[in-house]
Image: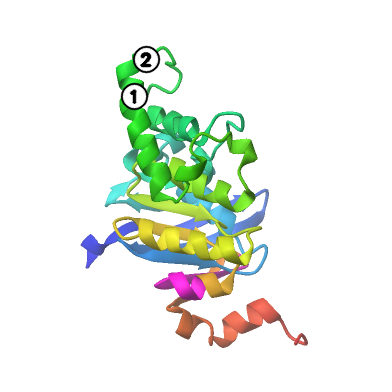
């Protein structure tokens, strides 16, 4: 079964000046699955994400991606290996069109981000791929619109398109539903499910109905430690999980 594990962390620990934010976390993410990382505020979820992508260096522990030890690798190097966190390539050019934003992400993958003098032939081929990706996330009608004019929920879809432009094998999504209305949540949920058909997704998410709907495996963190793991039906009934979320004396 080891071949089925795409990302694993052993004894992942992060201390900040005596405070342990993540403590001895072991994580196994199965290939082509949607795996959710949940927990109450301050549980260490974002720190965990930052450790996995090496925006933070672990105090202790090892991380392996596709069986390769990536502990100590630079974030850009990890992204090139196929492990990409969504915010790394979000649409940061508000006055470029959606097509141009996705094209910039495609250029990054080719290592030509800042070579805006590339031949027209190269840019034309990138344009067609950019439009394919925009269509894949349901944004074709907005392709030539400046990103700044896009409604909030559609910007999330654009972020996923720019992430897909890097052709990741595994995507880390940090609260993809934050700030979205019900219609957008349905749209982005469907998009994540579609994306995960031939990729692996690890997401931090607060919306429990989304987690229940999308995730095959859920890891619950509390106070920087793994509290429980398993399918939603099991985890949601775990007394320790209920206690962590609700606390004593609260309804």
2 displayed left or right of 195:
left
Residue, x 63% and y 37% (percent of image)? Answer: 148
Visible in this render: residue 116? yes
Q: Of the residues under marks 1 and 2, which one precedes in the sequence?
A: 2
Q: Is residue 11 above or below residue 247?
A: above
> Toward which corner of the image does residue 72 lie, by quadrant?
top left
Disc 1 crowd rating (10 Å Cα; few below 14, some 14-19, many 20+) is few
- Distance from disc 1 to disc 2, alpha carbons, whole Å, reads 10 Å
> Which image quadrant is residue 61 in?
bottom left
Labels 1 & 2 near each other (Cβ < 8 A): no
| 247 drawn magenta | no
Name the residue at the front extreme.
141
Magenta residues, as a range? 211-223
Q: Position of residue 194 (x, y in %)?
A: 37, 60
Give above or below for 149 relative to 209.
above
Q: Residue at x 38, y 21 (%)?
A: 112
Frontmost of labels 1 and 2 is: 1
Tag count = 2
- In the picture shown, does residue 191 fall above or below 127? below
Please identify the quadrant where the C terminus is shown: bottom right
- Residue visible at 76% across and 85% down in the picture: 250
Say which of 127 and 38 sits in front: 127
**Of the pair 193 and 23, the residue shown nearer to us:** 193
Report the residue marked by disc 2. Answer: 118
Q: Residue at x 30, y 18 (%)?
A: 121
Residue 99 in the image: state x and y as whole percent: 46, 34
Mark carried by residue 124: 1
Helix, strand or loop under label 1: helix
Q: Position of residue 34 (x, y in %)?
A: 40, 64
Q: Residues within 10 Å of mark 2 (few under 14, many from 20)?
A: few
Please, is residue 243 above or below residue 184 in the view?
below
């Amino acid at each position: 079964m080891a071949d089925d594990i795409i990302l694993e962390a052993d004894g992942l620990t992060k201390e900040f000046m005596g405070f342990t934010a993540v403590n001895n976390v072991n994580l196994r993410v199965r290939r082509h699955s949607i795996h959710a990382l949940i927990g109450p505020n301050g549980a260490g979820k974002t720190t965990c994400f930052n450790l996995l992508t090496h925006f933070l260096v672990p105090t202790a522990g090892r991380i392996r991606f596709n069986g390769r030890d990536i502990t100590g690798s630079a974030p850009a190097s990890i992204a090139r290996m196929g492990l990409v966190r969504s915010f790394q390539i979000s649409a940061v050019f508000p006055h470029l069109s959606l097509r141009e934003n996705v094209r910039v992400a495609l250029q990054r993958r080719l290592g030509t981000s800042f070579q805006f003098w590339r031949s027209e032939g190269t840019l034309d081929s990138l344009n067609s791929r950019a439009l394919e990706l925009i269509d894949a996330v349901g944004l074709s009608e907005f392709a030539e619109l400046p990103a700044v004019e896009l409604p909030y929920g559609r910007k999330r879809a654009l972020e996923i398109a720019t992430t897909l432009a890097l052709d990741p094998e595994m995507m880390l999504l940090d609260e993809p539903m934050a700030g979205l209305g019900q219609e957008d949540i349905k749209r982005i949920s469907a998009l994540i499910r579609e994306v995960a058909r031939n990729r692996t997704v690890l997401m931090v998410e607060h919306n429990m109905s989304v987690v229940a709907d999308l995730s095959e495996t859920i890891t619950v963190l509390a106070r920087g430690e793994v509290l429980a793991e398993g399918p939603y039906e099991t985890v949601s009934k775990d007394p320790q999980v209920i206690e962590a979320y609700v606390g004593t004396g609260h309804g």
